Image: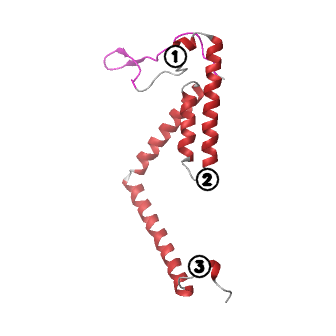
Amino acid sequence: MNTGSDEPREIAVASDEQAGEKVDEAPDEQGLGSRAPEFIKSRRLLHLSWQVLVFVIGLAVVVAGIIMLPLPGPGWVVIFGGMAIWATEFVWAQLVLRWTKRKVTEAAQRALDPKVRRRNIILTSIGLVIIGVILGVYLWKFGFEMPWNIKDQ
């Protein structure tokens, strides 16, 4: 487990090439590390207990999400919720969530590309035509009879 350090979080500083000044990190990009209250972080044993509790709760949520994958329920959403719980305390989970957000944003941008959209529409149309033909052949041959009720012919 990442127990962090007793030092306050450092904020990354980047230089602004145009103005030659230093600017703080973007407001939506928080520093990595524990987000536990200060009175918890100031006591080593309490902070370790806090991290164990956060890990167990996050693990329970992730396991529930994994169980929901084959069953009805929002499995992936719950798994990412568990990762978000872990990210409140563990740097590795924060990095995984940042990577995931970056990849989802890239995929969304690619999906909005006109060429990709056109390709997806064409493939969906072809798939629907194939399904329609198969359904039409089935209805022509067997009518509105369910497959398990069809007698051998």
In this orientation, which residue lies closer to the viewer: 151 or 135? 151
Which amino acid lies under the numbered mark 1 shown in the image of this protein?
Answer: Pro
To which residue does mark 2 refer? Answer: 71
Q: Is residue 142 above or below residue 65?
A: below
Kindly give the residue lying farthest to the bottom in the view shown: 153
Q: Quadrant of the N terminus?
A: top right
To which residue does mark 1 refer? Answer: 37
The segment highlighted magenta reads 2-27
Q: Is residue 43 above or below residue 36?
A: above
Mark closer to the chain start, 1 or 2: 1
Residue drawn at 64 percent across, 78 percent down: 148
Kindly give the residue lying farthest to the left in the view shown: 19
| Label disc, if present, on residue 146 of the rendered structure | 3
Instruction: Give residue 92's position: percent from left, percent from top.
Output: 59, 28
Residue drawn at 52 percent across, 38 percent down: 100
Kindly give the residue lying farthest to the right in the view shown: 152
Which amino acid lies under the numbered mark 3 shown in the image of this protein?
Answer: Met
Q: Quadrant of residue 121?
A: bottom left
Mark closer to the chain start, 2 or 3: 2
Element on which disc 3 rests: loop
